[in-house]
Amino acid sequence: MWILLPALCVAVAHIAGDNAALVPDMAAIVGPDIYITTIFAYMVFGSIIAGLAAWIGVKSGYELLVVIKRLFGCRGKKILAIAILAVCVPASALTGGYYCGWAIYKITGLTPTIVVPICLLVFSVLAAGYASELLKISNYISLSLVPIVIIMMFTRDLSSIGNINFSANVDWLLVCALIGYNVGGMRPVLIVETAAYLTQKGYKAIFLVIIAKLIEGIITLVMAHLVIVAQVHGPLALSGVYASTFGSNAVYLFDIILFCTFLNTMAPAMMVNAKQVSILTGVSFWPALLIASVLVFFGAFADFKTIIEVMSFTGLFMAVFIVYTAYFLHKNGIKQS
């Protein structure tokens, strides 16, 4: 039983822009085809990549950056930085720019052009370690997202989930983009570090991570189903489900919860972006954070479909890099120092 509660906690901690915003919005566009797409993205490929990342942590006992440096040297460290940036910058643009912009617009009426720079400034300040109390409060608020989704689930008809058509059209572009969300930024790093910390549990730590990814996939599947049943549209279609369930006057509360969910992922994401820029350029943290913020800012105003396409390619690259790292570690072991 020790594995179930930690797996649930890891799954809830991994709820981010892809789960609460991108998949529900795509559900409003593609309809029931989102079911099989979500299953492939999270429960199949997502679980495999998460399991491999956890295996790296268990096998080596080190965090991902240390593993890469010991296996491939400084060149490998820079390749990892490029791979993480290539996924994390467009993901940050989508979550911290596009979706945060829409969330604040729905709450305050301010346009994304005004809101996005302010949001990036807040994320950067949090990434630098300031205003930690604000981040704690945001974490507590965002914890209510999953319980609210469960409540909304019981107000809807869930029987059609059992009639998923496995021969439906899989949106492979979206699958690859979601793989990018799953393997980019903090997720593989946290998975490797979690598994390394739990090495005393042996390979049970790998099962914990895989179960967590399966639970995350189920939660995401429920969110997509709620959008399809409620027949609402994006952006932030899940907010529309809340409005149709509890009334439009209460939707501001849910938009705040969504924003806090995005904020919780963007603070560490900006820190990751800055660290990778620092590795590649050699500049200190603050200039690297400024460069990362500028990249995310311009990415936030790119075409939505273009961002998805970029993430699909960069996500595959990052996934292949993790697979190759696991293979190389298996064949050659790791240098001890």
Image (tube, helix red, strand yellow):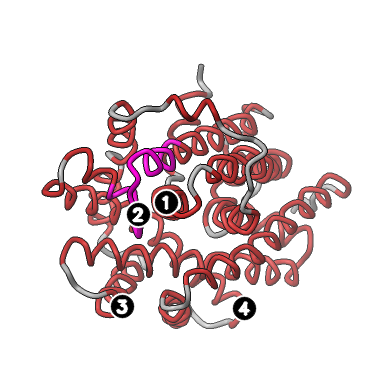
Q: Amino acid at mark 3?
A: Pro
Q: How many marks?
A: 4
Q: Amino acid at mark 1?
A: Ala
* Foreground tag (2 vs 3): 2
State the image coordinates of residue 99 (x, y, percent, origin top left): 36, 63
The furthest residue to the left? 249
Question: Mark 4 or 1 closer to N-term?
Answer: 1
The residue to which callout 3 is attached is: 117
Q: Are the residues flagged by discs 1 and 2 in contact, CB closer than 8 Å?
A: yes
- Label 4 to label 1: alpha-carbon separation: 39 Å
Question: Mark 1 or 3 closer to N-term?
Answer: 1
Question: Mark 4 or 3 closer to N-term?
Answer: 3
The residue to which callout 1 is attached is: 28
Which residue is rendered at x = 42% and y = 54% of the image?
25
Residue 10 visible? The answer is no
State the image coordinates of residue 241 (x, y, percent, origin top left): 29, 44
CA neighbours of label 1 inside 10 A, class few (<14), some (14 to 19), many (20+)? many
Which residue is rendered at x = 57% and y = 30% of the image?
211
Residue 123 visible? The answer is yes
Which secondary structure type mostly characterizes the magenta part of the structure? Answer: helix
State which region is magenta: 222-240
Q: Amino acid at mark 4?
A: Leu
- Label 4 to label 3: alpha-carbon separation: 24 Å
- Residue 261 highlighted magenta (yes or no): no
Q: Relative to residue 165, is residue 107 depicted above or below?
A: below
Which residue is rendered at x = 23% and y = 48% of the image?
254
Question: Mark 4 or 2 closer to N-term?
Answer: 2
CA neighbours of label 3 inside 10 A, class few (<14), some (14 to 19), many (20+)? some
Q: Nearer the viewer, residue 31 or 7?
A: 31
Q: Are the residues flagged by discs 4 and 2 in contact, CB closer than 8 Å?
A: no
CA neighbours of label 2 inside 10 A, class few (<14), some (14 to 19), many (20+)? some
